[in-house]
């Protein structure tokens, strides 16, 4: 019976942390211990995605603009930026424009984790739920 209880505890512990990355990924994406995310001021959905990324990395989130120092950027993919940044697939299409997460080149593990993170967000419906929350909030504040 003890071995069954131990096995169940281990299984539950493994399931509870399935969205948490290895510590090496957190160090690569948030080397200062805080995830510095460049965000557009008028993009609340990207803000929620950044918050979810910080939650999974188990680090605080510090929002910055694109002129400041950042670890990841929530942006439109542009060919001119591709020489310095790796892009995920899109997590959001807004007004016909793709939004991706970008990280500086030379961090292959971090880039791979971010691609998987975006795929998980799409599969789980996280972004669609964030959009719905924002829409409901806007409807509630409209007279």
Image (cartoon, rainbow, N blue to C red):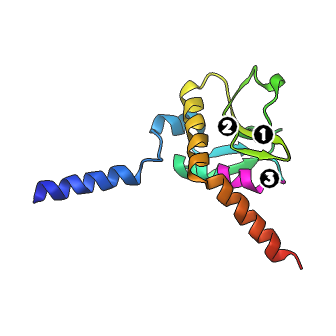
Q: Position of residue 36 (x, y in %)?
A: 68, 44
- As measured in the structure, the alpha-carbon distance from the residue carrying label 1 to the one carrying label 2 is 20 Å
Q: Earlier in the sequence, mark 1 or mark 3?
A: 3
Q: Secondary structure at mark 2?
A: loop
The answer to whether residue 36 is magenta is no
The residue range painted magenta reads 42-49
Majority secondary structure of the magenta segment?
helix
Q: Secondary structure at mark 3?
A: loop
Q: Is residue 42 visible?
A: yes
- Residue at the farthest top position: 83
Circle 3 sits on which residue?
Answer: 43
Please name which of the two marks, 1 or 2, marks the residue nearer to the observer.
1
Q: Secondary structure at mark 1?
A: strand
In front here: 46 or 30? 46
- Label 1 environment density (alpha carbons within 10 Å; few <14, some 14–19, many ≥20): some
In front here: 27 or 122? 122
| Occupied quadrant, residue 135 | bottom right
Circle 1 sits on which residue?
Answer: 98
> In this picture, is 2 found above or below 72?
below
| Occupied quadrant, residue 141 | bottom right
Circle 2 sits on which residue?
Answer: 71
**Residue at the (53%, 28%) spot, across then down:** 109
- As measured in the structure, the alpha-carbon distance from the residue carrying label 1 to the one carrying label 3 is 13 Å
Q: Position of residue 88 (x, y in %)?
A: 66, 33
- Label 2 environment density (alpha carbons within 10 Å; few <14, some 14–19, many ≥20): some
Q: Is residue 9 left or right of residue 47?
A: left
């Amino acid at each position: 019976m003890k071995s069954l209880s131990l096995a169940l505890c281990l299984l539950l512990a493994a399931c509870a942390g399935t969205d948490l990355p290895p510590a090496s990924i957190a160090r690569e994406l948030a080397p200062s211990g805080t995830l510095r995310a460049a965000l557009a001021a008028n993009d609340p959905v990207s803000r929620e995605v950044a918050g979810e990324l910080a939650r999974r990395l188990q680090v605080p989130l510090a929002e910055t603009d694109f002129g400041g120092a950042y670890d990841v950027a929530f942006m439109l993919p542009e060919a001119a930026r591709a020489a310095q940044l790796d892009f995920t697939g899109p997590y959001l299409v807004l007004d016909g424009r793709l939004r991706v997460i970008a990280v500086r080149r030379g961090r292959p593990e971090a880039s791979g984790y971010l691609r998987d993170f975006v795929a998980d967000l799409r599969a789980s419906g996280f972004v669609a739920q964030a959009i719905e929350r924002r829409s409901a909030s806007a409807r509630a504040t409209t007279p």
